């Protein structure tokens, strides 16, 4: 049975099972913590997958996970945010794709890391009502950044969180808009000729496991107090901001 799972390049049957389980765990973690599930998953995948396959395969898994997360909580999504964000994301991807080689990734990571830490300790910046203009800007900036670094969900999280005091509305809306970010990545890699079919069995299992993880995550989220969620969210934001700064220092040769 295990041998039958060894059909995906780079991994054997046991690794196939491990990544499927990780997809479930990180999806649940992403719902409960409000962010970070995708980064944890790609951290493990990076130990095995070559860069040429890592980003597109992870993109499919995250797109699928966010689709199922949105389906589970579709009644909570701020629907007025979807169209403006999608339009902005298309524009941001187009702009980012044209100048992707002209901005040092380490510089962008450092700026975003510092800015996110500032936002974390100055929550009034994120306050506001859910307007089309806000989500258009978020879509444009988020998709633009996604062409350089993979922490887009983390970067957008505090701004999406600021439009609702309900943790469930935030998680649902954040998932819905991230479908466009990851979906655009998948489309780009498909046009570039990446052979997704080779990884189809693994991606299908990971997306299915992600659905289960999202379901478990929302069950736990419904039992969690709002203050607990806010604290977990802030801690995760700090950790991931520091991670961005570390990556920036490493990329610039300071570490």
Image (cartoon, rainbow, N blue to C red):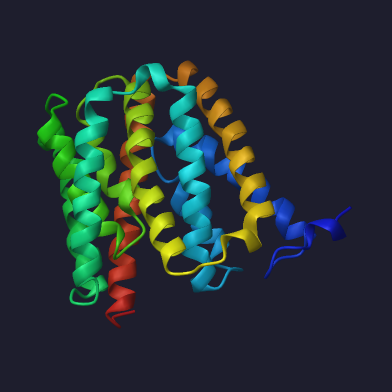
Q: Position of residue 221 (x, y in %)?
A: 47, 23
Does 142 appear above or below 74?
below
Q: Residue at x 62, y 32 (%)?
A: 212
Identify the image quadrant of residue 136.
top left
How many tags in the picture? Answer: 0
Report which quarter residue 207 is drawn in: top right
Place of residue 80 in the rendered image (x, y in percent of width and height, measured from the top left): 22, 24
Position of the C terminus by quadrant = bottom left
The image shows residue 40 at horizontal and vertical percentages of: 49, 52
Q: Nearer the viewer, residue 251 or 212?
A: 212
- Can I make out residue 255 in this image? yes
State the residue at coordinates (53%, 49%): 61
Can you see residue 124? no
- Horizontal and vertical percent position of residue 54: 51, 65
Residue in front for this viewpoint, 235 or 203? 203
Q: Is residue 142 above or below residue 79?
A: below
- Comparing 126 with 103, the one in front is 103
């Amino acid at each position: 049975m295990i041998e039958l799972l060894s059909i995906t390049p780079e991994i054997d049957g046991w690794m196939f099972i491990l990544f499927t389980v990780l997809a479930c765990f990180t999806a649940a973690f992403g719902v409960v913590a409000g962010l970070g599930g995708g980064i944890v998953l790609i951290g493990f995948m990076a130990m095995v997958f070559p860069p040429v396959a890592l980003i597109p395969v992870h993109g499919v898994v995250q797109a699928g996970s966010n689709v199922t997360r949105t389906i589970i909580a579709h009644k909570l999504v701020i629907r007025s945010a979807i169209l403006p964000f999608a339009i902005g994301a298309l524009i941001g991807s187009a702009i980012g794709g044209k100048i992707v080689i002209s901005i040092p990734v380490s510089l962008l990571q450092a700026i975003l890391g510092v800015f996110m830490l500032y936002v974390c300790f100055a929550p009034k910046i994120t306050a506001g009502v859910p307007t089309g203009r806000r989500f258009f800007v978020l879509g444009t900036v988020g998709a633009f950044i996604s062409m350089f670094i993979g922490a887009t969900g983390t970067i957008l999280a505090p701004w999406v969180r600021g439009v609702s005091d309900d943790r469930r509305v935030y998680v649902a809306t954040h998932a819905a808009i991230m479908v466009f970010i990851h979906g655009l990545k998948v489309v780009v890699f498909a046009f570039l000729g990446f052979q997704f079919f080779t990884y189809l069995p693994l991606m299908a299992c990971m997306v299915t496991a992600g659905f289960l993880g999202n379901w478990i995550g929302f069950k736990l989220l419904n039992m969690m107090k709002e203050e607990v969620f806010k604290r977990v969210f802030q801690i995760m934001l700090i950790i991931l901001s520091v991670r961005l700064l570390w990556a920036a220092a490493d990329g610039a040769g300071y570490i």
